[in-house]
Structure formats: structure tokens, C-alpha cells
Image (cartoon, grey):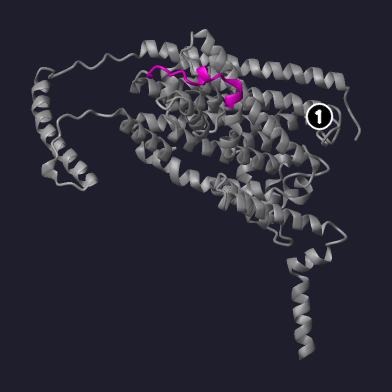
Amino acid sequence: MEKDFVVSELLGQGAAYTVMGICIVFLILIIIMFVIKAMALLSAEKAPEPEAAPAAPVAAEAESAADEGELVAVITAAVAACMGADASSIVVKSYKKADSWNRAGRREVIENRF
Amino acid sequence: MLTKLVEGFAAFFAKTGVAEIVGGFLSDGGWKTLVMLAIACVLLYLAIVKQFEPLLLLPIAFGMLIANLPLGEVMHMELFIDPNDPNAHLNIQRIVEEGGLLDLLYLGVKLGIYPPLIFLGIGCMTDFGPLIANPKSILLGAAAQLGVFITFIGAIVLGAFGIGGFGADGTMETIFKEAASIGIIGGADGPTAIYVTKTLAPGLLSAIAIAAYSYMALIPVIQPPIMKALTTKEERQIVMEQLRPVTKREKILFPIIVTLVVVLLVPDAAPLVGMLMLGNLIKESGVADRLCKTAQNELMNIITIFLGLTVGATATAETFLTPKTLLIICLGLVAFSVSTAGGLIFGKIMCKATGGKINPLIGSAGVSAVPMAARMSQKVGQEENPANFLLMHAMGPNVAGVIGSAVAAGVFLALFN
């Protein structure tokens, strides 16, 4: 192979291009970053007014009471099915939402989607 | 009668590819054809059984298979690359008259049509929301282009000392062009790598495309060890603040503004970034739902078939079975690893600068393989702290990486084309 260049010149110019390339990429993305920030300031939409706020809690309360009865029934049935016992022998005194179920669910969604 | 039949069969056999391989086996590189067929079969195995990016690797491998069968006449690389004059203009007239099926489809690669159309589809599928909500994360997308440039200079050093046959015609220009095409593998972005290589070093196209797509499939193997080596346990456990909701207006303005900034500053990146942002605008505007669906499904699938098949078909024995290909595969791994490391190191810097608000693991997502790289950040983070959800935080650098590697491609094209 015949070389048509001086090695030191090639390396020097290559290094210059390398540094220049990194700088240009950073420069352009930094510009975009500032543009996004400016855009966020300018286009901040007003948060929607909380309309009909007073009416909501009443409905929610009533709903949650109904929900609770149903939920207790579901829990009772599930526990009975798991233990193989009769549902009438089980009384749900209190229940607490466990965070780990949410987490497991979320993880499953992430695993499946991506 | 019998002799006529035998003669007829013999004449038919003489015209088959089998005879071509057997006849040329010892004299003119018939064994090379067999090696190429074997490589194609290995790639088919990886695509089908191991499911390495099957959507692309499968057509690539089959293109390789079909183009290397002798006398098939579906692909004529000599129509595109004149060995005596690499800078000769394309003779479209001749390609249309003499070309086979794949020659005509390859025009879409050669003229730079397919990669931007793939970007259109990617734009339709990408949500830039996490990036808009946390603009700082765009810097990680820039830092993860480090591998592109480190590999670029690495390949130049190899070329300078005549290792691997880079710049075979002995000019600096060729070495720069080939080094740039190899470096861009570190962007972890197939269409971008193909777009740069078809312009700067068409002879390396198949090797670079295969390296790029294989390593993308290997991200779950390559990235986690680097991520664990470069971060401490405490850093990996950092929980990041919830991202703020992004307004629709911001999402619509974003593609328009990015197009303005990037195309004004790096015009060579216009086809890639322009199409990416058009796709995103179609999606975010919400007024052209039909176009969005077509671009991200049918159009993208059609282009993927054409692109994979023809890129694979450029892998002929003369261009592929060289020490260069092996070197490209090695340099591609270096490029990927350094890009990952670059993002992580910058992530650590940002972690320190913000007083521990940023988990450095999201840095490795700056390589643009969406969404695998972001998923790796999520997975490695969750191993340390099961309640930690880094996925959306990592999507910011991840989509920034797409813009970053397109800009890096634009820089190379501006410098060397």
C-alpha cells in the first residue's frame, strides 16, 4: 500500500476533527436544551381550574361506602377460596392496601411493553 | 435418445449455481461463496432462534444468502461501486437497464431514501415528553456520542499504521471517511449508520450494518457490566423526582423548534432530523392520525424489508471476507462500550452537580437504541432498589441520543462528503 500522507499529519488532523465533532454535538444539544427551557417558560398553559370541586367529595364518599361492602365481600371470598374454608366462618376486620401489588403490576406492564 | 437426454441434463447442470461453485471451488474463490453462505446461515440462526433484532437481521441475512448464490443475478455491486474509480457518479440509466431486483431496491439505500423514511416512522412512535420535562437530560444524549468520536480516532490510528487495510488507496480522505462510518456504529442507530456509510464508504455498508444491528441486539449483554463497573451502589439507588407533566403545546412546538435549530446549524443532518421531527409533529399534532398510523406501521415495515434485504445483499465475498470486517466488528464493540461509558460518566458529573438528584444510570440510555437502552437503566436500577422506576427518566437521554447521533452523522457528512 502506498501512503499518500504523513502519519503525524493524519493523526493531528484526525484529533482535531474528533475534538471538533464532540464540541459541535454538545454545542447543538446545549442550544436545544436552552430552547426547550425557553419554550417551557413561554408556553406554560394555565392549570385548568378545579371545576365542580365541592360536588365531588360527596359522590366519592357514597361511592367508597358502596365499594367497601363489595371489596370486603371479594376479600372474604378470596380468602375462603385460598383457605378452603367456608365464607361464613371468615370475618374481615380490617384491610390495608399493599404497595407491593402496585409495584408488581407496574413492573409487569413495563416488562411487557418494552 | 438417451445420449440426447444426458447431454441435455449436462447442459442444464452446467448452467446451475452448483456447477459454478464446484467448478470454481479451487481456482477462483468458490470457497469464499461457501463461507458467505455459511455466514448468512449463522445470521439467520441468530435472527430466528436467538431473536437478535429479527425484523432487520432476518432480511439482511436472507439478502446475503440470495446475493451470494452464483448466477442468481439479483444484485450487481459493480453497478454501484466502480473498483477503478470509487468517486464515479452513479449511472442510473445503466442500473435501470441491467440491474436485477435488488439493484433497483438498493437505489433507495444508495440515494439515501430509506433511512430518513425509517426516521419518519420512528418520529411517529417517539414521545419526547420526558426530554421536554427534563431538558438537562439532553446532555447525556450528547455525552453518549463519545464512542462515535473515540472510535473514529481509533480507526484513524489503525489506518495510519496500515493495520486492517483502512484507506486502501492510501489517501487521508479515504481513511477519514471509513473511520467516520465505523465510528457512527457507536451512535447505536441503524438508519443513521447506514445513511453515513452509504455516502462515505459504501464498500463497508454490509459489515457496518450487521455490526450495528447485532450490537443493538446485544445491549442487554454489553451494557449492564459497564453500568455496574462505573457506578457505586449508592448512586444506583438514587430515586429521581417525578417528571412534570408536559403540555400539548410544548410537544407540538418541540419538533418544529428542533428542526429549525439543527437544520440551520448542521444542514447535512436535515434529511434524518427533518423526517424524525415531521413524524413526531404528525403524532403530537393529533390532526393526521391516519398518516401517523401508516408511517409507523405499513410504511416502516415496507422500508425495513427493502433496507434489510438490500443491505444484506451488498455483502459479497470480495467486500465482506476481509480483515476489515473483523476489525469493524471489534471497533463496533469499542464504539458501543465507550458510548455507554461516556453517558455514565457524564451522568456521574451531573449527579454531583445537582447534589445527587440524578441517577447516573440514566446516562447509559444516551445511546440511541430506543427503548432497549432505557430499559437497561430501569432494570439495573431496580436490581439495587426495587421501588425505583428510572424508565421515564431514562427515556429523556434515550430520545436525545437519537438527535445526538443524527447530529454527529451530520457533522461527519459535512466534514468528509
View extreme (bottom): residue: B1
Q: Chain of mark 1?
A: B
Foreground of the two, B110 or B403? B403
User: Residue B410, can we see it?
Assistant: no
Density class for disc 1 (Cα within 10 Å; few <14, some 14-19, many ≥20) is some
User: Residue B106, can we see it?
Assistant: yes
- Measured along the vertical axis of the image, is residue A20 above or below residue B128? above
Residue B61: x and y, percent? 63, 51
Which residue lies at the image location 77% right of the left edge and 21% below the top edge?
A: A14
Amino acid type indicated by mark 1: Leu
- Measured along the vertical axis of the image, is residue B28 above or below residue B165? below
View extreme (right): residue: A2
Question: Is residue B105 covered in magenta?
Answer: no
Specify the quadrant of the image occupied by residue B150: top right
Part of the protein shown in magenta: B227-243
Which residue lies at the image location 59% right of the left edge and 23% below the top edge?
A: B144
Question: Is residue B228 covered in magenta?
Answer: yes
Which residue lies at the image location 21% right of the left edge and 48% below the top edge?
A: A84
Quadrant that contains the N terminus of chain A? top right
Quadrant that contains the C terminus of chain A? top left
Q: Left or right: B283 with respect to B230?
A: left
Q: Left or right: B45 with respect to B151?
A: left
Residue B220: x and y, percent? 56, 36
Foreground of the two, A42 or A105? A105
Residue B379: x and y, percent? 48, 31
Q: Left or right: A106 with respect to B14?
A: left
Which element type, helix, strand or loop, lies under badge 1? helix
In this rendering, the count of numbered labels is 1
Residue B154: x and y, percent? 75, 26
- Measured along the vertical axis of the image, is residue B312 above or below residue B403? below
Which residue lies at the image location 46% right of the left edge and 31% below the top edge?
A: B278
What residue is disc 1 on?
A: B158
